[in-house]
Image: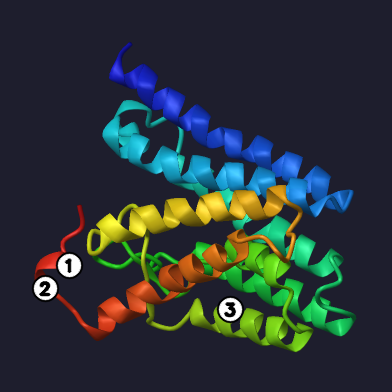
């Protein structure tokens, strides 16, 4: 098997995210929220795998006929933004006008952010909150806080997309990667388990989601507060 063929296979793997997005959307339309999130977790796992494979097989050189970055962004907008925003709106977690504000803020701000050429930092982290609304909404489904808390969180995270705050990429940010990768894997497992048990409030997965989410949100900010020059070079 040649590197060119492997590179094409990586693109095809990335494209499966579109299928998982459609399956998640169909579940969302039927308000089968657990099934929707299970498909989104599968898409999230694929998104975590295809990037390292794309760099390993140098898809830009070996399969340049397909723009992997564009393909990834299209699928990410569906699975990270569009479907989670729809779920938040239709679930009843945000009643009345608050739901309208949330979906408008999430979809509009994320579209602008995804097109921003400054979204990556020198160490391959994200500048501003990277629009991972799939993760946010899943945690909200699990914890079900008061709707005012949800609305404030949505507006605060949307604003955080456009401020110079650092958010780590668990795979590409070299600093603390030995911790970040297992935490991201743990989050994926907790998320899948929480959805599998239909967000049972007694599930131990909820605490795991909260702890791992807090790390993934604040690790980059802490790194900025305590910079370490030798770790600024991306892998």
The residue beneath circle 2 is 229
Q: As rendered, which of 176 and 173 lies closer to the eye?
A: 176
Distance (Cα) linking label 1 and label 2: 5 Å
Residue at (43% x, 24% y) in the render? 8
Disc 3 is placed on an element classified as: helix
Of tags 3 and 2, which is closer to the observer?
2
Q: Give residue 136's quadrant in the image.
A: bottom right
Q: Is residue 47 left or right of residue 218?
A: right
Numbered label tally: 3
Residue 144 position in % (x across, y down): 74, 74
Q: Give residue 105's quadrant in the image.
A: bottom right
The residue beneath circle 3 is 158
Disc 1 is placed on an element classified as: loop
- Mark 1 near mark 2, Cβ–Cβ under 8 Å? yes
Distance (Cα) linking label 3 and label 1: 26 Å
Residue 171 position in % (x across, y down): 34, 52
Q: Crowding at label 3, few (<14), some or many (≥20) Cα neighbours within 10 Å?
A: many
Up/down of 18 relative to 208, above or below: above
Up/down of 27 relative to 155, above or below: above
Q: As rendered, which of 163 and 63 lies closer to the eye?
A: 163
Q: Crowding at label 1, few (<14), some or many (≥20) Cα neighbours within 10 Å?
A: some
Residue 156 position in % (x across, y down): 58, 85
- Mark 3 near mark 2, Cβ–Cβ under 8 Å? no
Residue 71 position in % (x across, y down): 52, 42
Is residue 173 among what the camera can see? no
Disc 2 is placed on an element classified as: helix
- Mark 3 near mark 1, Cβ–Cβ under 8 Å? no
Residue at (58% x, 62% y) in the render? 135
Distance (Cα) linking label 3 and label 2: 29 Å
Residue lying furthest top in this view?
A: 1
The residue beneath circle 1 is 232
């Amino acid at each position: 098997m040649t590197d060119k063929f492997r590179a094409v296979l990586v693109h095809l793997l990335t494209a499966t995210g579109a299928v998982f997005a459609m399956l998640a959307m169909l579940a969302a339309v039927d308000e089968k929220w657990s099934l929707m999130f299970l498909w989104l977790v599968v898409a999230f796992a694929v998104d975590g795998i295809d990037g390292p494979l794309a760099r390993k097989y140098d898809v830009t050189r070996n399969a340049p006929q397909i723009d992997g970055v564009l393909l990834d962004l299209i699928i990410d907008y569906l699975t990270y933004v569009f479907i989670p925003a729809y779920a938040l709106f239709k679930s009843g977690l945000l009643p009345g006008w608050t739901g309208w504000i949330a979906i408008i803020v999430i979809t509009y701000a994320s579209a602008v952010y995804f097109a921003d050429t400054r979204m990556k930092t020198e160490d391959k982290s994200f500048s501003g909150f990277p629009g991972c609304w799939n993760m946010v909404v899943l945690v909200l489904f699990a914890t079900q806080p008061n709707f005012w808390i949800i609305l404030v969180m949505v507006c605060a995270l949307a604003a955080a997309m456009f401020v110079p705050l650092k958010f780590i990429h668990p795979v590409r940010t070299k600093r603390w990667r030995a911790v970040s990768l297992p935490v991201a894997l743990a989050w994926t497992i907790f998320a899948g388990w929480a959805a599998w048990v239909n967000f049972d409030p007694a599930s131990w997965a909820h605490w795991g989601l909260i702890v791992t989410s807090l790390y993934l949100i604040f690790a980059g900010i802490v790194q900025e507060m305590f910079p370490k020059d030798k770790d600024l070079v991306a892998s």
